[in-house]
Image (cartoon, coloured by chain):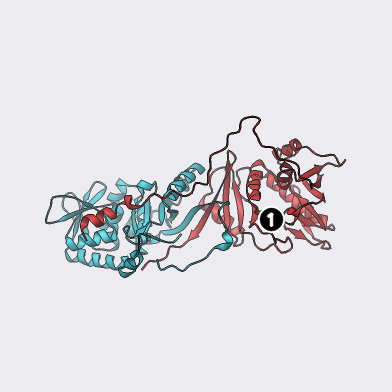
Chain colours: A cyan, B red
Amino acid sequence: MGPRWKGKGSEAKALAVPISRSILDLQASLIESNSHGMLSGCSVVLASNAEQTDLLNQTCFGRPIITVDKDKQWFQLTFEEAFYLCFSLRCINIVGGDNSVKTKDQLWEYMISKKPSFPTFFKAYSHLRIKNWVVRSGCQYGVDFVAYCHHPSLVHSEYGVMVFSEGNGNDRLRVWSDFQCTLRLCGSVAKTLLILHVNKTCENAIASPSYLDGYSVEERTITRWNPERCREDQVIVETRKF
Amino acid sequence: MEIEEWAASSGGSSDSEVTAPDSDSEENCYAYGDLPKLQFRKDTSKACWKEELGMAEIVSNKGRMWTTTGIARGGKIYIFLEDILFLAEIGALHLLDDEDKCIPLEDIYKKVAEGVGGSSWESFEVYRHLKSLGYIIKRHGVCWSVKRDKRVPAFVEGESGSQRIINNGNADLSSITATTELFSAMQITELRPVFDVYPPNSKFRKSNPGNPIFVLCISTGSPPTKKQVEDLEGKCDGVSLKFCYVEHGRVSFFSFNQIELPVLP
C-alpha cells in the first residue's frame, strides 16, 4: 500500500516542500528566538511567533491552543515531541515550574516518572522522525502513533504504529482477539499495522538519554491475508519517492 | 495559510473512514432439514488405508485432482488424512480397508480425532479452507515425489535413537510416518511449520512444483512472539511465512513482515 494522496496536486506540493526542509527551518527559527517550553503535567506548553506557528503546523509538532492572545500563539507538545525538539533537534529549552531550565537528564527523569514507557516510546518516535516521517498520536485509532509520509492535509496516514519493548514480550497484543481487534481498526481506516520493536542493549539503559543510541528498533508490519482475494504471484514492486 | 486551516487539517479526524469490503459474510443459520447434502460423484477414486503408514495408497484414481493431491512414491500416490477426509466429505473418494470394505466417514473423523499420522482437526480445517479455494497444499518437510528407482537412505528417529533404513521405495514412506508421528507427539502449543502452500495452478507438476508461495504455521494457543517468528523464519530458507489460527471454525491468516521504512525527502 503506497501513500494515498488527498486530491490532485498533493503529491507535487509535498515534493516541492519536503518535511526535512520545514524541520530545518523550524529548528533555525526556534534557536534564533531562544524558545522555551514550559513543563506542565504530561505536556509542554510553548509560545510561538507567526513563522514558527506555520512551521510547527506544517511539521505537525504539537497542537495549537486557541486563545485570545494576539501577540503569541500557544502550542501544547507531547513528551515525545518536546523531547525531540529539545534533545534531538536542540532548538528549544524546557523550564520547570520554578522557571529553571531543565537539563536533559532532569527532563528524562521527570518524563519517565510520569510515563514509565517513555524511553521506548521516545526511541520509536525519534526513529520515525529521523527518517522524516510525520508522527502523531494514534490513540483515536487504538494504536500508539500514526505515521504519515507528509502533512496530513495532503496524505492519509499509512501506518498505525504500536511500540513493543523487549522483555515485555507481547504484553500489548497478547491473544489473537487483540490482533483481530487492532487489525480491524487499522483496516477500517486503511492503515497498515506497524510494530516497532525497541530493544535495549544494556541493563541500565533507561538511566540517561545518552543510552538511546544503544537502543535498536526493528520494524514489522502485521497484515491479514485473505486467501479469497490474494494473488501473491502478481506482486509488483514499485520504487517509491515517498 | 490560515492557522485554523492547518490546525484543523492536521487533526486526526481528517483521516476518513474507509470501509474495506467485508469478507465476513453473514453466517447462514440452517434449520434442521435445510442442511445441504453433497452427492457422491460419478467418478469416485479409491484408496486403501495403510494402518502402519497412517496414510492411504491410491488404488484407482479418477479426476484431475491427483495432479495436485498426494505424494508420489515408487510410482504410486499416497495421501494423508487431511487429503482423505477432504475428498471423502465431498464424495470424491472411497477409503477402503484391508478387506476392500468402505470405511465410513465416522471412522475417518475418529482417526483425525485420534491424531493419526500427525493429523489434527485444526490442521484439517485449515487444509479444507485453502483446498476449497484451489490452493495446492503439501505437508512441510515432505517431498512431492521421489523417483521409482531411487534407493533413499532414510533416517528414522525413534524413541530409541536413530536407525538407518535402506529399503527400496518404502524407506521414504517410513521416514514420513516417523516424522508425522513425531509431530503428533509434540506439544499442542508448539508452533511449527505445517503446510507448504502453492498457488492455484492447472499446470502444476509434482516433479517440478517450484517454490511454495508461503509456509504456513498453525497456532493453537497464543500469537507468536517476535523470537518465535524469527526462529521459524530461520528454518524456512527464505520462503515467506504465514501464521493462522482457527477459532469456531473460522480460519484467520496473518503475515509478520520485516520491513524497513524509507527515509523520506
Label 1 Cα crowd, 10 Å radius (few <14 / some 14-19 / many 20+):
few
Q: Position of residue B21 (x, y in %)?
A: 48, 49
Q: Quadrant of residue B115?
A: top right
Residue ID at (75%, 54%) = B64
The outermost residue toward the right is B99
Residue ID at (24%, 67%) = A25
Q: Position of residue B222 (x, y in %)?
A: 54, 44
Q: Position of residue A168 (x, y in %)?
A: 45, 47
Q: Pick the residue in front: B153 or B139.
A: B139
B123 relative position to B166: left or right: left
Which part of the image, by quadrant, shows the N terminus of chain B?
A: bottom left
Secondary structure under the numbered disc 1 in the rendered image: loop
Q: Quadrant of residue B220?
A: top right
Residue ID at (56%, 38%) = B27
B19 relative position to A113: left or right: right
**Is any atom of residue A211 visible in this view?**
no
Determine whether B198 is above or below B108 in the image: below
Which part of the image, by quadrant, shows the C terminus of chain B?
A: bottom left
Q: Position of residue A99 (x, y in %)?
A: 16, 52
Chain identity of mark 1 = B
- Give the residue at mark 1: B141
B265 relative position to B230: left or right: left
How many numbered callouts?
1
B58 relative position to B83: left or right: right
Q: Three-letter amino acid code at disc 1?
A: Gly
**Is any atom of residue B147 visible in this view?**
yes
